[in-house]
Image: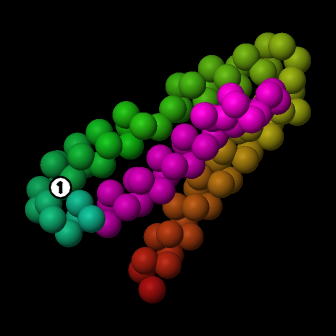
Amino acid sequence: LTLHFYTGNFPLATFISNILSCIILIIAVFYIKKIVDSEIMRLFLITGICGGFSTFSTFSFETFSLLKTGYYTIALINIVLSLAVGVGLIFMLLKNQAS
């Protein structure tokens, strides 16, 4: 999807996929918690849904490739931005849902 309009070195497609996975995780947590009684089944469904969509291995490989080719700043931005946005998004959604 991003290949058509983005040609930079930052791994934008992986970043977008991981952020969408965070959103899906939160939605899954809220809805599955309401309809599934078994804790083991909830963990299985949540991990299965988001584990198949999340691209942590791709994130790791692309970050390593950036470091290997000397794009240290872009690699650092990728790490910081992915973690900050992903964790921040989950924090905000969980905090708003608890209110």
Callout count: 1
Residue type, label 1: Glu
Q: Residue furthest toward the left? A: 37
* Location of residue 89 with respect to 55 vertically, above or below: below
Q: Circle 1: is it few (<14), some (14-19), or many (20+) Cα within 10 Å? A: few
Q: Quadrant of residue 80?
A: top right
**Which residue matches tag 1?**
39
Where residue 52 sits: x, y (%)? Answer: 37, 34
Q: Residue furthest toward the front? A: 4
Which region is colored magenta?
1-30
Residue 17: in magenta span: yes
Q: Quadrant of residue 71?
A: top right
Q: Is 94 on the left or on the right of 36, as rendered?
A: right
Q: Is 38 on the left or on the right of 66, as rendered?
A: left
SS state under label 1: helix
Q: Quarter of the image containing the C terminus?
A: bottom left
Q: Quarter of the image containing the N terminus?
A: top right
* Location of residue 36 with respect to 2 vertically, above or below: below
Where residue 48 sits: x, y (%)? Answer: 29, 39
* Location of residue 49 with respect to 14 vertically, above or below: below
Q: Residue furthest toward the bottom? A: 99
Q: Quadrant of residue 65?
A: top right
Residue at point 66%, 45% (across, down): 82
- Depth order, front residue of 13/65: 13
Residue 97: in magenta span: no
The main secondary structure of the magenta stretch is: helix
Colouring method of the image: rainbow
